[in-house]
Amino acid sequence: MMPLCDLTATPPSCSAKGTYINDDGLTLDIKTERHTYTIAYSHNISTTVGAAPDTMEIVITGTGPEHSINGNDLLGAIQIYDYTNMNFTGAAYDVTVTQEDTVGTPVTHSIGETVFR
Protein backbone atom coordinates (compact mmCIF):
# COMPACT_ATOMS: atom_id res chain seq x y z
CA MET A 1 0.00 0.00 0.00
CA MET A 2 1.11 3.54 -0.66
CA PRO A 3 -0.70 5.88 1.73
CA LEU A 4 -1.63 9.37 0.64
CA CYS A 5 -1.26 11.90 3.46
CA ASP A 6 -3.65 14.81 4.00
CA LEU A 7 -2.02 17.43 6.20
CA THR A 8 -5.05 19.74 5.91
CA ALA A 9 -7.43 17.26 7.59
CA THR A 10 -8.25 17.55 11.29
CA PRO A 11 -6.45 15.59 12.60
CA PRO A 12 -3.89 15.06 9.80
CA SER A 13 -3.83 11.46 8.56
CA CYS A 14 -2.68 9.13 5.80
CA SER A 15 -4.79 6.51 4.04
CA ALA A 16 -4.93 4.00 1.19
CA LYS A 17 -7.68 1.76 -0.18
CA GLY A 18 -7.78 -0.97 -2.78
CA THR A 19 -9.50 -4.12 -3.99
CA TYR A 20 -7.97 -7.57 -4.45
CA ILE A 21 -9.86 -10.20 -6.44
CA ASN A 22 -8.93 -13.89 -6.34
CA ASP A 23 -10.36 -16.76 -8.38
CA ASP A 24 -8.90 -19.88 -9.95
CA GLY A 25 -8.43 -18.22 -13.36
CA LEU A 26 -10.79 -20.66 -15.04
CA THR A 27 -14.23 -20.22 -13.52
CA LEU A 28 -17.04 -18.30 -15.17
CA ASP A 29 -19.01 -18.44 -11.91
CA ILE A 30 -17.91 -15.20 -10.25
CA LYS A 31 -20.67 -15.33 -7.61
CA THR A 32 -19.65 -18.59 -5.95
CA GLU A 33 -16.03 -19.12 -7.06
CA ARG A 34 -14.41 -15.72 -6.55
CA HIS A 35 -13.29 -13.81 -3.46
CA THR A 36 -13.22 -10.02 -3.43
CA TYR A 37 -11.23 -8.30 -0.68
CA THR A 38 -11.46 -4.59 0.07
CA ILE A 39 -8.42 -3.37 1.99
CA ALA A 40 -8.45 0.02 3.72
CA TYR A 41 -5.46 1.42 5.60
CA SER A 42 -5.07 4.56 7.70
CA HIS A 43 -2.71 6.06 10.27
CA ASN A 44 -2.61 9.31 12.16
CA ILE A 45 0.23 11.79 11.94
CA SER A 46 1.77 12.20 15.37
CA THR A 47 1.71 15.64 16.96
CA THR A 48 5.34 15.01 17.96
CA VAL A 49 7.54 16.08 15.05
CA GLY A 50 9.59 13.15 13.70
CA ALA A 51 7.65 10.53 15.69
CA ALA A 52 5.97 7.45 14.27
CA PRO A 53 2.17 7.46 14.03
CA ASP A 54 0.38 6.78 17.30
CA THR A 55 -2.17 4.48 15.68
CA MET A 56 -2.80 2.65 12.43
CA GLU A 57 -5.74 0.60 11.22
CA ILE A 58 -6.07 -1.98 8.48
CA VAL A 59 -9.58 -3.13 7.61
CA ILE A 60 -10.03 -6.12 5.30
CA THR A 61 -13.53 -7.00 4.18
CA GLY A 62 -14.00 -10.15 2.14
CA THR A 63 -16.90 -11.47 0.11
CA GLY A 64 -17.32 -14.77 -1.68
CA PRO A 65 -17.59 -18.44 -0.83
CA GLU A 66 -16.85 -19.83 2.62
CA HIS A 67 -14.08 -22.08 1.25
CA SER A 68 -10.57 -21.15 0.19
CA ILE A 69 -10.16 -21.01 -3.59
CA ASN A 70 -6.37 -21.35 -3.60
CA GLY A 71 -3.27 -20.22 -1.70
CA ASN A 72 -3.75 -16.65 -2.90
CA ASP A 73 -6.59 -16.31 -0.37
CA LEU A 74 -4.03 -16.43 2.46
CA LEU A 75 -2.72 -12.98 3.36
CA GLY A 76 0.88 -13.47 4.42
CA ALA A 77 1.98 -9.84 4.75
CA ILE A 78 1.11 -6.25 4.02
CA GLN A 79 3.77 -3.93 2.64
CA ILE A 80 3.52 -0.23 3.47
CA TYR A 81 5.62 1.65 0.94
CA ASP A 82 7.76 4.61 1.97
CA TYR A 83 7.35 3.77 5.67
CA THR A 84 10.86 5.00 6.48
CA ASN A 85 9.91 8.53 5.39
CA MET A 86 6.82 8.30 7.61
CA ASN A 87 9.03 7.56 10.64
CA PHE A 88 7.89 3.96 11.14
CA THR A 89 11.40 2.46 11.49
CA GLY A 90 11.72 0.96 14.98
CA ALA A 91 8.10 1.76 15.89
CA ALA A 92 6.32 -0.96 17.88
CA TYR A 93 2.58 -1.56 17.77
CA ASP A 94 0.22 -3.86 19.63
CA VAL A 95 -1.75 -5.89 17.08
CA THR A 96 -5.37 -6.89 17.50
CA VAL A 97 -7.76 -8.55 15.07
CA THR A 98 -11.49 -7.98 15.17
CA GLN A 99 -13.69 -10.56 13.45
CA GLU A 100 -17.43 -11.01 13.36
CA ASP A 101 -18.73 -14.21 14.89
CA THR A 102 -21.47 -16.30 13.26
CA VAL A 103 -24.20 -13.87 14.38
CA GLY A 104 -22.31 -10.71 13.41
CA THR A 105 -20.99 -9.71 16.83
CA PRO A 106 -17.45 -8.24 16.73
CA VAL A 107 -14.88 -10.33 18.63
CA THR A 108 -11.40 -8.87 19.25
CA HIS A 109 -8.27 -11.00 19.57
CA SER A 110 -4.86 -9.71 20.71
CA ILE A 111 -2.12 -11.32 18.61
CA GLY A 112 0.97 -9.62 20.02
CA GLU A 113 3.33 -6.86 18.98
CA THR A 114 5.02 -5.97 15.71
CA VAL A 115 8.07 -3.77 15.14
CA PHE A 116 8.90 -2.01 11.87
CA ARG A 117 12.46 -2.68 10.70
Image (spheres, rainbow, N blue to C red):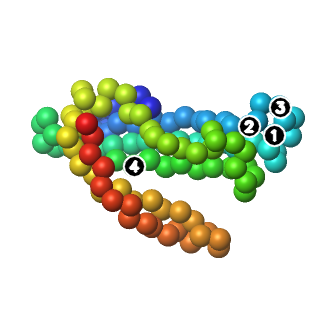
Q: Nearer the viewer, residue 11 or 73?
A: 73
Give the label on residue 23, or none.
2
Q: Identify the residue under disc 3.
A: 26
Q: Nearer the viewer, residue 116 or 21?
A: 116
The answer to whether residue 10 shows anywhere in this view is no
Amino acid bearing label 4: Glu
CB atoms of marks 3 and 2 within 8 Å: yes
Q: CA distance from mark 4 to mark 1?
A: 29 Å
CB atoms of marks 3 and 4 within 8 Å: no
> Residue at 65% across / 71% down in the picture?
102
Splitting the image into 4 quarters, where does residue 112 fall?
bottom left
CB atoms of marks 2 and 1 within 8 Å: yes
Amino acid bearing label 2: Asp
Ranked by sequence position, the earlier of labels 4 and 1 is 1
The answer to whether residue 18 shows anywhere in this view is yes
* Residue most extreme to the front: 71
Q: Nearer the viewer, residue 69 or 10?
A: 69
Q: CA distance from mark 2 to mark 1?
A: 8 Å
- Secondary structure category for the residue under label 4: strand
- Residue 64: percent from the left, percent from the top? 73, 49
Q: Nearer the viewer, mark 2 or mark 1?
A: 2
In the shown orientation, is residue 29 left or right of residue 106?
Answer: right
Q: Identify the residue under disc 1.
A: 30
